[in-house]
Amino acid sequence: MPFCIGISAIFESSRTVHARTFLMAVNHFINHHDTHGLTFRFEDDDASYDGGRRAAQRLLDQGAQVIVGHFSSDAAMGALPLYRAVGVPVLLPAATKQDLLGMEPHAFRLCPSDTGLVTLLARRIRDDIPGARLLVAHDSTDHGESLARALISTLAGSNVRLTLTLEQADAVVYCGRLNNSIRYVNTLLNRRRDLRIYLTDDALSSWFIQNTPPSDTLRIVGLATVDPSQALYETYYLESLAAMQIAATLIHCQDRLDTLRTTLFTTVLGDVRFCDGENRYARAALWKIRNQRFVPSTSA
């Protein structure tokens, strides 16, 4: 019987270009790797809690033995308890919410968590603009709210002063999904062009560059790449492809959870080893835009 890999995310590129990136990574794996003995099942999770639950149940009904996906933290929150109940492992390429893994011993994250992202971001804000008045804004998603809470907690007791009004701010951090980040930045730059602007990982996309005006003061925190040339890939592409590579190695494993907890995997992302569900080699980096491309500003 073929080994079944369940694949789930939001698949409508009209709603987010990350859908196209994810499917490109999956298709690359299917077309360029040994898939003998593998079968694939796809379910759209709507990037929502309820959508995640529906997709998870459908994948389990189709016999999925390992899951790659649930990009959004919202969908992952809904889906993970269903997988836990039957012991199916989940490889999360992009869901950063810090407490996702707390009760989920079967979930394994390839990207940095909220803590990894905001630790670097907070340090850079403290170092670059000590004593600054900072506005922390976010969208209504679980992803955005979680990152904003983590950042505020990390900055507590520092010399950075939080403000609730744009007029009083020296810098702004916006935590949210890609299209929301684009809308926020475009509105912000129409009102204030003198501010330092920091965005979170979902905005690390060429779609952002294409749909916002240039800004020398803008930085985006996201995944650090092993090789600078990998910055040419869309964010989440390497994480998704690496998740597919790891999932395929489980085909002959008797205890898949133990294999995921104890094995050093060699992937397109570099070495991956999980400790308490986190990729111990995942690192955050701050990126800037130069000549219509992302280039590293610094890394953790």
Image (spheres, helix red, strand yellow):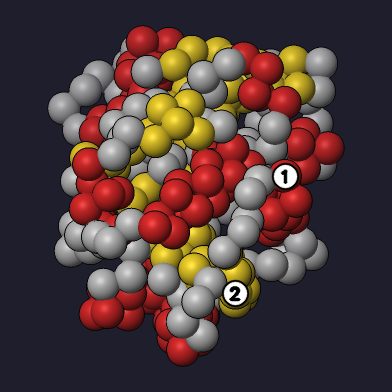
Give the residue type that dot 1 points to.
His
Please tell me whether mark 2 sits on a helix, a strand or a loop.
Answer: strand
Q: Earlier in the sequence, mark 1 or mark 2?
A: 1
- Residue highlighted by disc 2: 41
- Label annotation for residue 176: none
Q: In the displayed structure, does residue 31 sit left or right of residue 224?
A: right
- Label annotation for residue 32: 1
Q: In the displayed structure, does residue 217 sit left or right of residue 75?
A: right
Report the front residue among 145 and 135.
Answer: 145
Q: Position of residue 296 (x, y in %)?
A: 58, 15
Q: Please say if the residues under marks 1 and 2 sit with CB atoms less than 8 Å apart.
A: no
- Residue at image location 58% in from the left, 16% down from the top: 227
Please tell me whether mark 1 sits on a helix, a strand or a loop.
Answer: helix
Q: In the displayed structure, does residue 156 sit left or right of residue 189?
A: left
Q: Position of residue 37 (x, y in %)?
A: 57, 64
Instruction: Please count the marks in the image.
Output: 2
What is the quadrant of the C terminus in the image?
top left
- Residue at image location 50% in from the left, 34% down from the top: 267
- Residue at image location 51% in from the left, 19% down from the top: 226
Give the residue type that dot 2 points to.
Arg
Q: Can residue 131 be seen in this view?
A: yes
Report the front residue among 107 and 74.
Answer: 107
- Relative to 88, say whether 292 is above or below: above
Q: Can residue 221 be seen in this view?
A: no
Report the front residue among 182 and 111.
Answer: 111
